[in-house]
Amino acid sequence: MQKSDLPSKLCPVCQRPFSWRRKWAKDWDAVRYCSERCRRRKAGA
């Protein structure tokens, strides 16, 4: 599978697109933030 074929989402904090990662395979539907930094900043967004 090529990187361009992977699903992607938009981070609600930084508004940047991020792609699927293997570590998120089991809970991709629950992933909302592109990084731990954005997850911590969610209260300010």
Image (tube, rainbow, N blue to C red):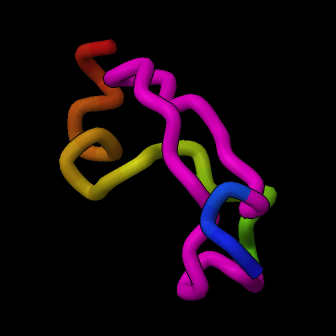
- Find residue 14 and report its horizontal and vertical position in percent: 33, 23
Q: Is residue 29 left or right of residue 39?
A: right
Foreground: 35 or 7? 7
Range covered by the magenta-colored residues: 5-26
Say if 9 sits above or below 24 in the image: above
Residue 29 appears left or right of 38:
right
Q: Residue 40, position in %: x, y?
A: 24, 44
Residue 13 among those drawn in magenta: yes
Choose between 44 and 36: the one closer to the eye: 36
Name the spot of residue 7 as percent of width and height, x first.
Answer: 76, 54
Q: Is residue 14 above or below residue 4?
A: above
Looking at the picture, how far across and down is residue 30, in whole percent?
71, 57
Front-lying residue, 4 or 45: 4
Is residue 17 located in the magenta-colored stretch of the structure? Answer: yes
Q: Quadrant of the C terminus?
A: top left
Direction from residue 38 to residue 5 in the image, left or right: right
Occupied quadrant, residue 32 = top right
Residue depicted at x 73% and y 62%: 6
Q: Is residue 14 above or below residue 27?
A: above
Point 76% across, 81% down: residue = 1
The picture quadrant where one finds residue 26 is bottom right
